[in-house]
Image: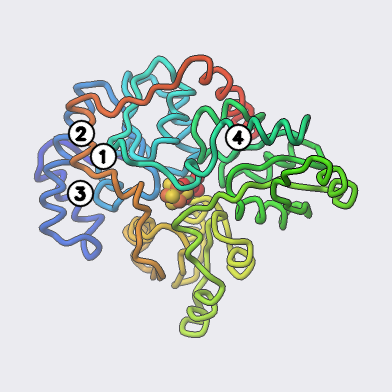
Amino acid sequence: MPISDDSIDATFARMFEKLQGIVPEAEIRYKAELAFEINQLKREKNAIILGHNYMEPALYHSVPDFVGDSLELSRKAASTDKDIIVFCGVRFMGETAKILSPGKTVLVPSPKAGCSLAESLTAEDVRNLKKQYPGVPVVSYVNTYADVKAESDICCTSGNSTAVVESLDTDTIIFLPDEYMAGNIARETGMKVIFPIKNPRELGKQHKDLQYTIIGWRGRCEVHEQFTVDDIKNVRKQFPDAVILAHPECSPAVVQASDFSGSTSAMIKYVQENRAERYLLLTECSMGDNIAAENRAKEMLRLCSIRCPHMNEITLEMTRDALLKNQFQIEVPEDIRIKAKKAVDRMLAIG
Ligand code: 13P
Ligand code: SF4
């Protein structure tokens, strides 16, 4: 929720209350000035700011009207009546907002905010897979670009991937592009994962052997692939009471060794609702700061000081400039948008 924007001092006071001990006071003071300016601009321009859970703590706790995971923010993008959507997240998220709200101006504050998963796969790759596996439904993780979504039957997010796969009521799917998420879905559904085979004749043989099959792609999140089972063992040795939470973009072995796996918002909710005092978060580091700010009595352990370089592109300065200069506008060609929207709407209908 946005904080009061009556004055810079009021903005600072509210941010300080949330962030003291997490962000240095001088930084809060500087960022409060920016947040004040952004909240004024937002009102003048009839804009809404959506903030992904990975935004840095001062941004996260000051300017977004809504914060959340990809699924929650897609829903907000679909239902807003504002003229401008500023998406403090990465490009594929802005594209999803534009797919759902074509009449709005959608801005992502940095043109460099990509995603290693989205970049691992092209629409041409999907067309080739469909030729290789005719009639097999294509499920695409939302961490893909619009042209890939347009080639897909249905999308999913980390919050609903298993529900989406189960809704298809089929024994074989193509799941793109996250190899680890495919493995995690396979574990939950009892399916098996195979990776594309060049010769379609070999495919026929494979299908006879495998009753329930996910045809996967070797895309990975450059952040979540860094966590290992050894990391978990080391933390459990030092902090036997720590509850371990892993995002489904972590490897199946890491997810299996953890206590809970879910979308970024599901992890936040888990910490809020659980009584344990110590947690290890196997996800992007800033989210640990954001959870710590809201749960002062709980300790958030983090293994990795590396932030997602793409999410890290989004700063308060860039968000202010986005509103001032109407940049960087997301455009999706209409033919692609219409096809992609079918896949996104089908997912949203599932929940
Ligand atoms: P969520 O949908 O869980 O927020 O995940 C998005 C993402 O990019 C995680 O790396
Ligand atoms: Fe993409 Fe991973 Fe960054 Fe999420 S954390 S935006 S999946 S690179």
Q: Are marks 2 and 1 in contact (CB under 8 Å)?
A: yes
Separation of disc 3 and disc 4 at Cα? 38 Å
Query: For this view, does 41 lie left or right of residue 222?
Result: left
Mark nearest the camera among 1 and 4 is 4
First in sequence, mark 3 or 4: give its number.
3
> Could you say where residue 287 lies in the image, as x and y percent from the top left?
38, 56
Q: Secondary structure at mark 2?
A: helix
Q: Say which residue appears at 38% left-offset and 19% top-offset.
A: 81
Residue highlighted by disc 2: 39
Separation of disc 1 and disc 4 at Cα? 29 Å
Separation of disc 3 and disc 2 at Cα? 14 Å
> Could you say where residue 98 lies in the image, as x and y percent from the top left?
43, 24
Q: Tell whether circle 3 marks a residue whose Cβ is less than 8 angstroms from ligand 1.
A: no
Amino acid type, callout 1: Val
The numbered disc on residue 63 is 1
Mark nearest the camera among 3 and 2 is 2
* Image quarter (top left, top right, bottom left or bottom right) of the C terminus: top right
Please tell me whether residue 208 is drawn above or below residue 247 in the rendered image: above
Query: For this view, does 252 lie left or right of residue 142?
Result: right
Residue highlighted by disc 3: 14
Q: Secondary structure at mark 1?
A: loop
First in sequence, mark 2 or 4: give its number.
2
Mark nearest the camera among 2 and 4 is 4
Residue highlighted by disc 4: 155
First in sequence, mark 2 or 1: give its number.
2
Q: Secondary structure at mark 3?
A: helix
Amino acid type, callout 2: Asn
Separation of disc 2 and disc 4 at Cα? 33 Å
Q: Secondary structure at mark 4?
A: strand
